[in-house]
Amino acid sequence: MSVAQEKLGLYIGRLEKIIIEFNFNEDSAAKLLEELKADMGKKVVVSPDEKELFEACIYNALATINTVLEQGKKSTQLLMSLTEAKEEMKAIMELL
């Protein structure tokens, strides 16, 4: 498994945990979401063949999540954006 696939797999797992956590503790989920977004914003060294697709995937996932203005409370819009970002990363991970 490549570095890009591993990173996407980790991000997907964390997103799934955040989605579940919003059902139990919104404050904890919001904190986990902020940590994930910060980690996704960090530079990751991947192979040149995967770089363009990986970076576009991360950019799009963050853009999708950031379209929701209120990220500290559970809402349908927030959960949908998290789910959409997760599904997109899954699809890209399969392509890599």
Image: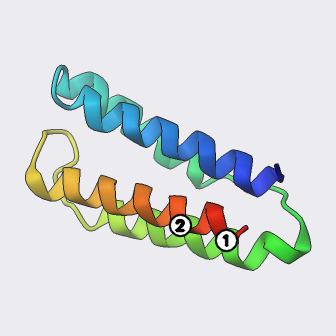
Identified at 21% across, 32% down, the residue is: 22
Identified at 63% across, 61% down, the residue is: 93
Q: The residue tagged with tag 2: helix, strand or loop?
A: helix
Image quarter hosting the C terminus: bottom right
- Which residue appears farthest toward the right when viewing the image? 48
Q: Is residue 55 above or below residue 23?
A: below
Marks 2,1: beta carbons within 8 A: yes
Q: Is residue 59 above or below residue 9?
A: below
Q: Nearer the viewer, residue 26 or 21?
A: 21
Residue at mark 1? 95
Q: x, y percentage for residue 15?
A: 41, 42
Residue at mark 2? 91
Q: Residues within 10 Å of mark 1 (few under 14, many from 20)?
A: few
Please indicate whether residue 43 sits to the left or right of residue 76 in the image. right
Q: The residue tagged with tag 1: helix, strand or loop?
A: helix
Please indicate whether residue 76 sits to the left or right of residue 30 in the image. left
Q: x, y percentage for residue 33?
A: 38, 39
